[in-house]
Image (cartoon, grey):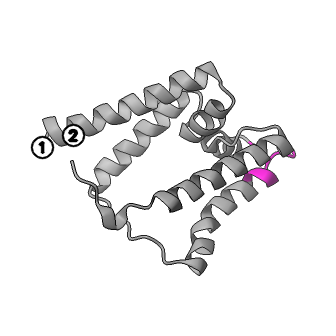
């Protein structure tokens, strides 16, 4: 294994992680809600009265973030080495896993772990193990 030193960005990654943690903490303190993307978007599919505006604002902020970032620095080049069918299958599997796990990596991995939630610790360990196993199978057993 080698490190691609030209794309190794520990300080940028640390700053991004700190911003995510700060935003999650502020969101929890001000609203009493967990910043889990699947739950926020899912709440838009079955909206409750008075519960739509903040969800739309949250999603709009997520969508606007790359545009705001691009004003300060160029966006990184994105390369996806998968076909459309693979991406659709992966998206469906993530959606099913999110429903079975009662949350996503942002809800469990960021918000849940920071609160020390045992359920989130188990869910995040399961997400990570499934990811590691998938990469191993696809890269080493199927190719």
Q: Element type at marker 2?
A: helix
Which mark, by number, is residue 108? none
Magenta span dominant secondary structure: loop
Name the spot of residue 9 as percent of width and height, x first.
44, 61
Q: Element type at marker 1?
A: loop
Q: Is residue 4 left or right of residue 130?
A: left
Mark 2 Cα-neighbour bin, 10 Å: few <14, some 14–19, many ≥20: few
Towards the viewer: 50 or 130? 130
Q: Is residue 133 above or below residue 45?
A: above
Name the spot of residue 61 as percent of width and height, x first.
68, 62
> Which residue is under mark 1?
143
Q: Residue at x 54, y 38 (%)?
A: 105
Q: Earlier in the sequence, mark 2 or mark 1?
A: 2
Residue 129 placement: quadrant: top left
Name the spot of residue 99 as percent of width and height, x first.
54, 30
Q: Is residue 48 magenta?
A: yes
Q: Residue at x 51, y 30 (%)?
A: 124
Q: Is residue 4 magenta?
A: no
Q: Residue at x 71, y 51 (%)?
A: 23
Quadrant housing the C terminus: top left
> Which residue is under mark 2?
138
Q: Which residues are magenta?
A: 47-55
């Amino acid at each position: 294994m080698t490190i691609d030193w030209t794309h190794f960005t520990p300080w940028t990654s640390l700053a991004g992680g700190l911003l995510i943690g700060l935003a999650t903490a502020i969101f929890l303190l001000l609203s009493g809600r967990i910043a889990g993307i699947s739950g926020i978007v899912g709440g838009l599919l079955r909206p409750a009265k008075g519960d739509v505006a903040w969800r739309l604002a949250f999603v709009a902020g997520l969508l606007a973030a790359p545009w705001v970032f691009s004003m300060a620095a160029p966006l990184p080049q994105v390369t996806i080495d998968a076909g459309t069918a693979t991406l659709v299958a992966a998206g469906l599997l993530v959606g099913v896993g999110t429903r079975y796990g009662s949350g996503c990596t942002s809800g469990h991995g960021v918000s849940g772990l920071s609160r020390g939630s045992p359920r989130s610790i188990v869910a995040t360990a399961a997400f990570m193990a499934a990811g590691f196993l998938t990469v191993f199978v696809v890269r080493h057993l199927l190719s």
